[in-house]
Image (cartoon, helix red, strand yellow):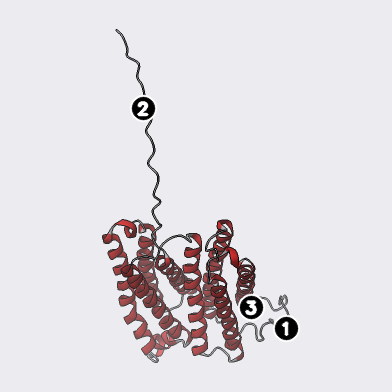
């Protein structure tokens, strides 16, 4: 089977995957806004909202957030379904295994839809809502990494130390996100700050922030000091370090404001999702093979003698 015989098709699929990364990040952010605005049950039924596709008379901010969250999820599912069908039909012109990967992503989206339905039917249980977030962030990471491989299908895999450090940083950030999600979905932070109850999740989330940030910064520092190809990735590396700094600042502001500013809380979750996507992209990135060029013949230039 031909590994790469249609670069234009690969590029189009990469563009679709890149748009899906943005759409799933938006899905995570809108889901966070839905939770912060206590709109998780604004649509009492599923998959419709008040028994219709577009609830006109019942529409308000809370209903819109929940309705738009479902709409974004539906668009992601349909786009990935079309991508999977394309990968199967054109599989002879694509890398081996890509259709299977698309099927796996489609299965994750179906599971995500099932968890979304359970959050409504079971009246927002904390464990299911956290699993819903975990699966969404997993999709962000997988789609972001796959986008890198499709954009540069001939690039080699990165060195072992790069994969190890980037993988540790990615899993640490994912774990920190899940701790934050568990804390948020059980309203532990509010209960801890107001009544001194359920402080365990808040303490765990705060305690895990520094190790996760340290692993990301360690990865960035080692990559920059290593030089060569890894140092050439400095835009992504410095962006990851900047996102960590912003995330820590937003976390501090969120607690100091007593979780009373929804915009700050939503921005905290948005930066986390973007950081997951960036770390996954860096983990999947690798050096491009060097092209050996034939030596060029230098033509001699004949200079006429100038007679004074």
Q: CA distance from mark 1 to mark 3?
A: 13 Å
Report x, y in % for residue 234: 35, 58
Closer to the eye: label 1 or 2: 2
Figure check: 97 above or below 129:
above
As drawn, which residue projects farthest toward the left? Answer: 225
Crowdedness near tag 3: few (<14), some (14–19) or many (≥20) residues, C-alpha within 10 Å? many
Question: Is disc 2 surrounded by few (<14), some (14 to 19) or many (20+) residues within 10 Å?
Answer: few
Quadrant of the image containing the C terminus:
top left
**How many marks on residues?**
3
Q: Residue 73, image x and y in percent?
A: 60, 75
Label disc, if present, on residue 51 of the rendered structure: 1
Decide if residue 112 is in sight here: yes
Q: Is residue 303 above or below residue 229?
A: above
Q: Secondary structure at mark 1?
A: loop
Q: Nearer the viewer, residue 220 or 251?
A: 220
Label 2, on which residue?
300
Above/below status of 172 relative to 14:
below
Q: Is residue 126 left or right of residue 200?
A: right
**Which of the pair 180/217 is nearer the observer?**
217
At x 37%, y 41%, the residue is: 295
Label of residue 278 in the image: none
- Between discs 3 and 2, the one toward the N terminus: 3
Q: Looking at the rendered structure, which numbered label has been put on residue 63? A: 3
Real-space Cα distance between discs 1 and 2? 82 Å
Q: Nearer the viewer, mark 3 or mark 2?
A: 2
Whether residue 256 is visible to the viewer of this picture, yes or no, is no
Query: Closest to the observer: 126 or 254?
Result: 126
Q: Position of residue 184 (x, y in %)?
A: 46, 83
Q: Quadrant of the N terminus?
A: bottom right
């Amino acid at each position: 089977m031909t590994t790469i015989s249609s670069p234009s098709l690969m590029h189009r699929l990469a563009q679709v995957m890149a748009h899906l990364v943005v759409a799933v990040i938006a899905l995570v952010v809108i889901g966070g806004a839905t939770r912060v605005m206590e709109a998780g049950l604004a649509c009492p039924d599923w998959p419709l909202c008040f028994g219709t596709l577009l609830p006109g008379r019942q529409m308000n901010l809370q209903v819109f957030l929940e309705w738009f969250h479902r709409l974004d999820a539906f668009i992601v599912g349909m786009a990935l379904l079309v991508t999977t069908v394309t990968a199967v039909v054109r599989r002879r012109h694509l890398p081996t295994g890509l259709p299977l990967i698309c099927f796996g992503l489609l299965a994750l989206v179906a599971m995500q839809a099932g968890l979304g339905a359970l959050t409504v039917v079971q009246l927002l249980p904390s464990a299911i809502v956290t699993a819903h977030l975990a699966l969404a962030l997993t999709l962000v990471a997988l789609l972001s990494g796959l986008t890198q491989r499709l954009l540069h299908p001939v690039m080699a895999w990165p060195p072992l130390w790069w994969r190890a450090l980037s993988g540790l940083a990615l899993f640490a950030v994912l774990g920190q996100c899940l701790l934050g999600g568990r804390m948020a979905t059980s309203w532990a932070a509010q209960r801890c700050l107001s009544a001194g109850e359920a402080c365990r999740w808040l303490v765990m989330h705060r305690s895990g922030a520094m190790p996760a940030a340290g692993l990301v910064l360690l990865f960035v520092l080692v990559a920059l000091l290593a030089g060569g190809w890894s140092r050439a990735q400095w835009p992504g590396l410095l962006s990851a370090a900047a996102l960590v700094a912003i995330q820590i600042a937003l976390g501090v502001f969120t607690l100091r404001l007593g979780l009373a500013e929804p915009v700050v809380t939503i921005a905290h979750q948005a930066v986390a999702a973007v950081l997951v996507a960036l770390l996954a992209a860096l983990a999947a990135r690798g050096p491009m093979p060097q092209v050996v060029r034939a030596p060029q013949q230098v033509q001699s230039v004949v200079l006429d003698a100038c007679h004074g």
